Image: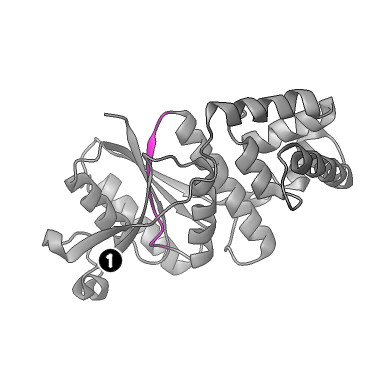
Amino acid sequence: MSKAIFIATLGAEPQVVTLALDALLAASEPISRVLVVHTAADRSPLNESLQALRTEFVDRGYYGSKLLFIPHVLANPEGPLADVVTPAEIEAAFQSLYTLFRQYKHAGYRIHLSIAGGRKTMALFAMAAAQIWFDAADRVWHLVSDQRLIETRQLHAAHPGDVHLIAVPVVHWGRMTPDDRMRARHFIEHVLTPAERELTTLLVREGLSNSALARQLGKSPKTIANQLTSIYDKLGSYFGLREAPDRTMLLVLLGSYS
C-alpha cells in the first residue's frame, strides 16, 4: 500500500483537522504525516488553534509516534502571509500550495486534502493546485460533523457516526498521457528559446511569481513579463488553444515536465 499524507487547511477550529484525520485512520488509510496549512499564527484564534493541535499531537502524543505533525505556514519572499485576501496574497498562497503538492507527489505520496478549515479563498486555491497535481488516487475532503461537536469543539468524536467525510469531485487538469508528456517535453526543449526554456522550467518546478522569477534569474520583472507573453503565444499556437493561455494553463499543460 502506498504511503499517504493528510494535508489540512487550518483556521480557528482545530477539531476540523483531528476529526477528519480520525475518520481517515478508522478507514485504515496509511497516513504517516499530517501537514497543517495556515497563515501567520500571530492572530489569537489561529494561534490558539495551532497550539491545541501541537498539544494533541506532540505534548499529549494522542496519535503515538506513528504520525509526524508538520505545521506549514503560507509565505511569500517577504515572510509568512498574514491572510489570503488580496491578489498578491492569493497568488503567493497558490504558489506555496502548488509547490507543496508537487513535492509530495514527486515523493510518491497519496494525498488526502481537507479544505474544511481556514478562509474559503485558501480552500479555493488549494483546490486549484490539487487539480493540477492530484491523480485518481488522491482525495479532497469536506467535513460534516454533529452540531454538538461544533458547539463543544471536541477534538475527537465519541461516536463514529457523528463525523462524515464528503469527497469533493476533482477535475484532474494535470493528468497527462505519455503522448501529452512527450508533447510538453518537445515544446519546452525544441520550440522555446534557451532563455524561455530556463524561465518555463523554473516556473513549472517552483510555481513562482514574476517578481520571484526575476530575482531567481537575475532579470527585471518587465523582462520576465515579456518572456512569458512570448511563451503564452507559442503555447497557444503549439497546442491549438482557442484563447491565449495564462499562468495556470501553462502549469496544467507543462506540469509533467520537471
Query: Does the rendering let one see residue 41?
Result: no
Residue 136 lies within the magenta run:
no
137 versus 2 height, above or below:
below
- What span is colored magenta in the figure? 108-117
Residue 103 at what x, y percent from top left? 51, 34
Q: Say which amino acid is labelled 1.
A: Val
- At a point 76% along the width and 34% down the height, the residue shown is 199
State how many labels appear. Answer: 1
The residue labelled by disc 1 is: 144
Query: Does the rendering let one see residue 28?
Result: yes
Q: Which quadrant is the C terminus positioned in?
A: top right
Q: Quadrant of residue 208?
A: top right
Residue 207 at what x, y percent from top left? 64, 42
Tell which of 250 and 75 is nearer to you: 250
Structure colour scheme: one colour
39 versus 175 height, above or below:
below
Query: Image check: 149 left or right of 236?
Result: left
- At a point 83% along the width and 29% down the height, the residue shown is 195
Tell which of 252 and 150 is nearer to you: 252
Residue 59 at what x, y percent from top left? 27, 47
Q: Which quadrant is the N terminus positioned in?
A: top left
- At a point 69% along the width and 59% down the height, the residue shown is 88
- At a point 56% along the width and 44% down the height, the residue shown is 98
128 versus 239 height, above or below:
below
Query: Image check: 223 left or right of 175?
Result: right
Circle 1 sits in a helix, a strand or a loop, which is it? strand
Label 1: few (<14), some (14–19) or many (≥20) C-alpha neighbours in 10 Å = some
Query: Image check: 172 left or right of 93?
Result: left
